[in-house]
Structure formats: C-alpha cells, structure tokens
C-alpha cells in the first residue's frame, strides 16, 4: 500500500511538471503569435502605403510626361522667337528646358515689356483714354503662323479685357528674381533673369518646410541641399528659398548680408559649396544656441565592459548635441567634470588616491585614464591567504602555507597531494605504526602553529612600540 501511494505521488508530481511545461510552451507560443500578428499588421500597413505611393508616382510620371511633351513644343517656338529677336538661341533653349512647364510660364504675371520683347507683339497706348489696345490682327496673321497667332491673341486679349473692365492699369506685383547663367555654343556667358512663380515657391516650401526654431537643424539643411541638387538650383535660388522658409519670429534677426543678398558675392576661387557654407553659418547663428537637455547627458555612465576612450567619445557626442553651450568644444570645463564624475571604478579610485592628468584637456584626460585601465588589468592584487609560499629568515627558507613545514611549496606538499609512488618495495606498515606516525605529525603541526602565532604576536607588539617611540620623538 505504501509503495502504491508513493508511486501515485510520483506520478502526480510528474504530471504537474508536465502540465507546467505545457503551460509555459503555450505562453511562449501565444507571445510568438502576438509578435507574428504585429508583424503582419506592419507588413500590411507597409503594403497599403507602398500601393498608395505607387499610384501617386504613376500619376506624377504621367503628368511629367505631358509637361515634357508640352515643353518640347514650347522650346521649338521659343527658338524661333528668340532667333528673330536677336537673342542667343542656344542659351535661351537651355534656359527654357529648365523651366517647369509651359503652363506655369504662361500663368506668370509678366510685365508688358517682357511680353513685347519675347513675342514681338506691338502694343499701342492711347494717351487720351489711358487705354491699351493691340494692333490689328492682320499684321500678326501675316507675320506669324496660325497657331502662334492664336496663342498671342489669347494672351493679349485676356490682359486687355481685364484692364478695360477696371479702367486702370494694375500695380506691379512683388516678384522674386532668379538669375540663370548659361553658356552658348561660343562659350559666351549669358545671364537670363526670370520671375519665380508662386507655384514654384509653394512647392519648394512644402517639400523643405519651415526652418525649425528649436531642435535639429541638419534635417532642414539636407532637404534644402537635396532640392538644389535635384532641380539644379543656383546659389541665388537657394538664398531666395531660405528667405521664404525662415519663421516669422526670426525675421527681425535676419542679418543685413542675408537680407540684401551680399552673402552671395563670390570671392576668387570660391565654389557654390563655399557660398552654401556661409549661408548655413549665418542661419545657425541666427537661430541661437539650442535648448539644453541635461537629463540626456547625466544618464551616461561608463559600463564595466566599456573602455574609457569609448565612454568619453559617447559623452562628447551627447554633450555637443544637447548641452546648448555656445563655445562647445572637447576641452569644455563642464564636459571634463562630467567625465570625472561618471567614469568607472578604476578611474574613480585613482582620482580619490590623488591621481590627476598632467593637463586639464580632453585628450590628456583620456590618455591618463587609458593608462590607469591598462595598469589595473596587468597588476593583480594578492592577499596573504592567497600566497603559495613565504620567505622567512636570513636564508630565505621556503615554508609551505598548508602544512607550515619548511623545505617545500604547496604544490609539492605530500600531506595535501599525497606521497608519490616509489619504484622500490618497502615492508608493509601495521596499523599501529600508522597511528603513531599520525600522532607525531599532529603534535608537530600543533607546535609549529603555536610557534608561528607567538612570532606574529611578538612582531606586532614590536611594531606598535616602534610607532609610539616615533610619536614621542615628534
């Protein structure tokens, strides 16, 4: 009966252990299923997002193809007009290709002089009625093609009707001038000035965004440089976009060189990157120092597996990003003090013992701390209990620290490791003789320990007496 009950208890315990294992496996599987569902949801979201972006990109590609076709037609017409007007055709053609589209160019609120210069459409003004009226359509039909005539009629009639309804000439709109410098086939430099349309301005502003008043600045600058490289913008274009993206609260802090455009003056041997660097420095100075976040810096400590050099570099990067110090450099006094406070135990012990780097600089402190770490790895702190042998007396007699007998070390102690087997055969010792030997060994060990204890106590008393005499002499 007892054996049956014992077997039942063992089987019950085994069943409980099996049940616990099954439950733990179920919990692990449930967690894995949750993670898999979360990954599936994330992949589904990415799939929908990529599908949406695909549709958007397809529509954008179609729109760009249409604009490209219209741009080609516009370029061919522009070559004829500029050739008759006496402008360099190659330069005007290159500038026309860089325009965004024919529609944006037609929607610009250009002045009457620009229209007359490009289209060579004569416009007369009646001084008595202060009205602007075009010449007869027969002259245009005789000089230009039907398609060109219809286009010129559409542009001139729309502007004419608007002014006739109001009875007055509207005031000139504020425009942003963008300078384009191109070279023709003869390597002659030609500068063409055009007005940046409102559509271009709004699109650049939407893509780049407003310059952040606080926080990281590099993201905004990277977007600006990406726009400049993609659309082949010149420094004057970038300067104008920068003025549009400056927040209103910083308008009063815009320096005169940035406001007037003198920052764009190219010195001898300078490139576009040099001009962009000047603009970037002015913007950073205008924003002022960033807001300090000391909680990010204070939580950085040297870990046990981290070298001091890696810890110092990590502390410097965080201090530079979140300290908000104006003269932020590696030799900053606050940074050096935080390196001392958050260093590892080896460096803290060395500082507590009075150690100090030769110079109060970042590099000197890193070199000094690295030497301390290397020395702590090579040197081993030994205690008296861990020593394997000690030398006593004038003759440096070797004494075992296990049996306290002279003449051998701990590694060769027969009492600890046993005596080695000899090649010669000795007579068997009786049990009585073994007991006698063990008694003599124990008595000898006891005597040796007593002698060593008395010697140590006497030596300690002598040291105390010597210290008291030194104090009295002082």
Image (cartoon, grey):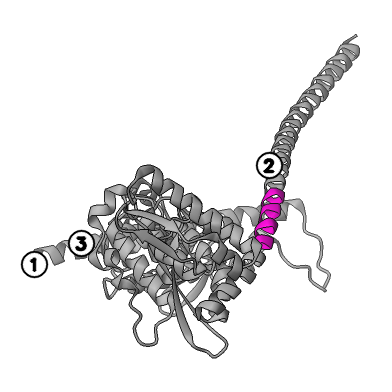
Residue 232 visible within the image? yes
Quarter-of-image position of residue 239: bottom left
How many C-alpha atoms fall within 10 Å of the one at disc 1: few (<14), some, or many (≥20)?
few
Q: Is residue 168 above or below residue 363?
A: above
Q: Nearer the viewer, residue 448 or 163?
A: 163
- Residue to which mark 2 is pinned: 49
Query: Mark on residue 474?
Result: 1
Q: Nearer the viewer, residue 397 or 312?
A: 312
Residue 102 visible within the image? no
Quarter occupied by the C terminus: bottom left
Magenta stretch bounds: 57-70
How far apart marks 3 and 2 lie (CA) works out to 88 Å
Residue furthest out toward the bottom? 186
Q: Nearer the viewer, residue 76 or 146?
A: 146
Quarter-of-image position of residue 45: top right
Q: Nearer the viewer, residue 31 or 55?
A: 55
In terms of secondary structure, where does tag 3 sit? helix
Q: Return the disc, 1 or 3, that comes first in the chain's sequence.
A: 3
How far apart marks 1 and 2 lie (CA) works out to 87 Å
Q: Return the disc, 1 or 2, that comes first in the chain's sequence.
A: 2
- Residue to which mark 3 is pinned: 465
| Residue 69 included in the magenta stretch of the image | yes
The answer to whether the residues at label 1 and label 2 have Cβ atoms under 8 Å apart is: no
Q: Is residue 21 above or below residue 234?
A: above
Quarter occupied by the N terminus: top right
């Amino acid at each position: 009966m007892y054996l049956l009950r014992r077997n039942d208890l063992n089987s019950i315990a085994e069943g409980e252990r099996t049940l616990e294992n099954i439950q733990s496996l179920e919990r692990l599987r449930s967690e894995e299923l949750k993670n898999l569902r979360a990954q599936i949801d994330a992949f589904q979201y990415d799939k929908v997002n990529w599908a949406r972006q695909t549709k958007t990109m397809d529509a954008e590609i179609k729109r760009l193809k249409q604009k490209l076709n219209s741009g080609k037609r516009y370029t061919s017409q522009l070559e004829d007009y500029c050739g008759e007007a006496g402008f360099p055709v190659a330069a005007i053609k290159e500038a026309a290709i860089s325009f965004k589209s024919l529609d944006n160019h037609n929607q610009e609120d250009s002045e009457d002089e620009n229209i007359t210069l490009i289209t060579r459409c004569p416009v007369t003004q009646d001084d008595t009625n202060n009205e602007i009226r075009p010449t007869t359509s027969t002259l245009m039909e005789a000089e230009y093609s039907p398609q060109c005539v219809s286009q010129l009629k559409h542009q001139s009639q729309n502007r004419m009707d608007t002014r006739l309804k109001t009875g007055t000439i509207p005031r000139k709109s504020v425009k942003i001038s963008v300078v384009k410098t191109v070279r023709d086939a003869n390597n002659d430099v030609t500068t063409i000035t055009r007005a940046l349309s409102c559509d271009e301005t709004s699109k650049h502003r939407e893509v780049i965004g407003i310059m952040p008043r606080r926080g990281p600045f590099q993201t905004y600058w990277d977007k600006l440089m990406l726009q400049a490289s993609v659309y082949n913008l010149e420094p004057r274009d970038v300067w104008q976009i920068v003025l549009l993206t400056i927040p209103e609260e910083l308008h009063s802090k815009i320096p005169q060189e940035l406001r007037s455009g003198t920052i764009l003056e190219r010195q001898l041997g300078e490139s576009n990157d040099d001009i962009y660097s000047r603009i970037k420095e002015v913007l950073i100075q205008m924003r002022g120092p960033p807001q300090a976040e000391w909680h990010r810096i204070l939580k950085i400590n040297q870990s046990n597996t981290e070298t001091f050099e890696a810890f110092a570099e990590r502390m410097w990067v965080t201090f530079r990003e979140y300290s908000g110090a104006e003269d932020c450099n590696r030799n900053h006094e606050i940074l050096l003090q935080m390196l001392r406070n958050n260093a590892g135990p080896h460096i803290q012990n060395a500082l507590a013992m009075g150690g100090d780097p030769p110079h109060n600089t970042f590099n000197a402190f890193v070199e000094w701390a690295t030497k301390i770490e290397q020395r702590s790895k090579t040197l081993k702190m030994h205690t008296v209990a861990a020593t394997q042998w000690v030398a006593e007396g004038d003759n440096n007699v070797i004494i075992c620290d296990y049996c306290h007998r002279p003449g051998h070390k701990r590694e060769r102690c027969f009492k600890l490791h046993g005596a080695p087997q000899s090649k010669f055969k000795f007579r068997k010792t009786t049990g009585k003789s073994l007991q006698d030997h063990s008694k003599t060994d124990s008595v000898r060990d006891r005597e040796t320990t007593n002698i060593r204890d008395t010697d140590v106590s006497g030596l300690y008393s002598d040291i105390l007496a010597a210290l008291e005499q030194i104090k009295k002499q002082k």
